Image (cartoon, rainbow, N blue to C red):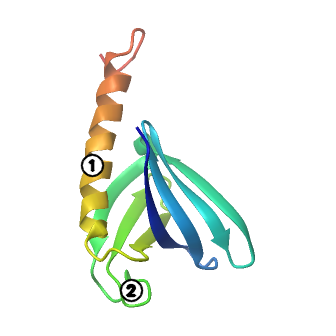
Amino acid sequence: MQESYGVVWREASGPLGRGKLELYPGLLRLDGLAGSGPACREIAYGDLALVRVGRAPTDRIAGRPSLVLELRGGESLAIASVSQPGVVGELAERIAVLRIADAVYAWSRPGSNAA
């Protein structure tokens, strides 16, 4: 089942993105516009090193708390809701559950090296 949220996001020094965050089994997808061009980013849950609610001034987007995703490769991005102030905590919980489900699925697949 896919869930969708209206968000803005910031990656490194790139332009602010705006659009939607969709949660799928196995990955999350940011889809919309960054600057004046289209932007689409898919991130597998297995590529996430850390998911946290960013409350520090440097984590915030336009003064709003954000969801900070730190990737295994060292990149990070911040995501904030455009309309629902409490959605950042909800997203952190949903992504945590999806990460666990994805890890269990990967571990239980026939031929998996994790077993």
Residue 50 sits in quarter: bottom left
Where residue 92 appears, as percent x and y from the top left, is: 28, 59
Residue identifier under label 2? 58
- Residue 113: percent from left, percent from top: 39, 17
| Mark in the foreground, 2 or 1 | 1
Q: Nearer the viewer, residue 85 or 102?
A: 85
In depth, the one of 49 and 97 nearer the eye is 97
Disc 1 marks a residue whose amino acid type is Ala
**Residue most toward the top?**
110
Q: Is residue 105 above or below residue 33?
A: above
Query: Would you name the residue on which mark 1 appears?
Result: 96
Q: Earlier in the sequence, mark 2 or mark 1?
A: 2
The percent coordinates of residue 18 (x first, y second) are 57, 73
User: Observer-nearest residue: 98 or 111?
Assistant: 98
Residue at the image point whose x is 44% and y is 43% from the top: 2
Q: Are marks 2 and 1 in contact (CB under 8 Å)?
A: no
- Residue located 26% across and 43% down the image: 97
